Image: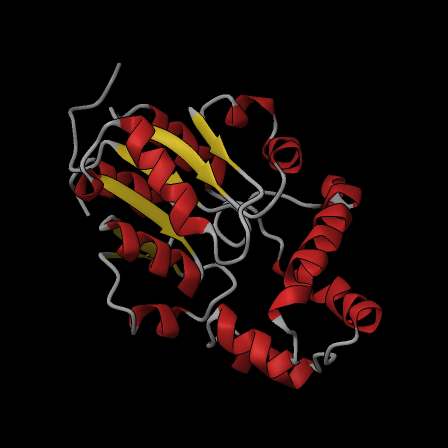
Amino acid sequence: MTAQAGPYGLVVLDVDGTLIDSFGWFCGVLNGVADRYRFRRVEAHEVEALRRLGAREILRHLGIPRWKVPLIARHMHGLAARDAAHLRPFPGIPSMLAGLSETSAGLAILSSNREDVVRRVLGPEDAARIGAWSCGASIFGKARRLRRLVKAARLPPGRVLCVGDEVRDAEAARAMGCAFGAVAWGYTDPQALAALAPDHLFREPGEVVAALRGAY
């Protein structure tokens, strides 16, 4: 049975740090990537401070020039494909996707990660709940990808909810005039996300479903 229509007609979901718990994995491979591409290694005591920064600030801190970003991203995607069997969705994400699929809203993925990796980690049942996929976005290319998803959905931007865990997710949503729901369980510190004044700050996955039902 489909639930009564809520305030949003499309939910656009980020993956890493939003659906998939990959932060520990990311920290585990990062310094090897730093040595390969000659940027600053990250010490354990720096991690929490970096979680309060946006992507541009992190690149500056690590000394990564923009021209290296696609090379590093491609290498990281290869590592994620190699290690996909060890990655898992966050607790509560399968229930969240099931709940969202019972609303009248469509579901879309917008991610820098590869679609085949995302499908493997989510599993066939949850991957099948997603109606549109836009994967492989460049680190600052999400707004362009989001524009295409909104156009394909034939909805006004205000009826689109983007759910993510990074400053760049918020920037892409704002650039398109979409609502933004920040999640408190991902890469970026929740206080840093709250400072962006998101339309929603979700403390646990069930709150995303409540927002779609107009109850959050």
Front in this rendered view, residue 191 or 159: 159
In the picture, residue 73 is in which quadrant? bottom right
Front in this rendered view, residue 88 or 194: 194
**Residue that appears at 30% across and 69% down:** 194
Q: Position of residue 206 (x, y in %)?
A: 35, 43
Quadrant (top left, top right, bottom left, bottom right) of the N terminus: top left
**Residue that appears at 40% across and 46% down:** 144
Q: Position of residue 59 (x, y in %)?
A: 58, 74
With respect to residue 4, does 24 lie above or below? Answer: below
Q: Position of residue 132 (x, y in %)?
A: 44, 27
**Residue that appears at 28% across and 44% down:** 161
Looking at the image, which residue sits at the far top?
1
Q: Is residue 77 visible?
A: yes
* Horizontal relation, residue 186 to residue 47: left or right: left
Q: Position of residue 48 (x, y in %)?
A: 55, 79
With respect to residue 117, does 32 lie above or below? Answer: below
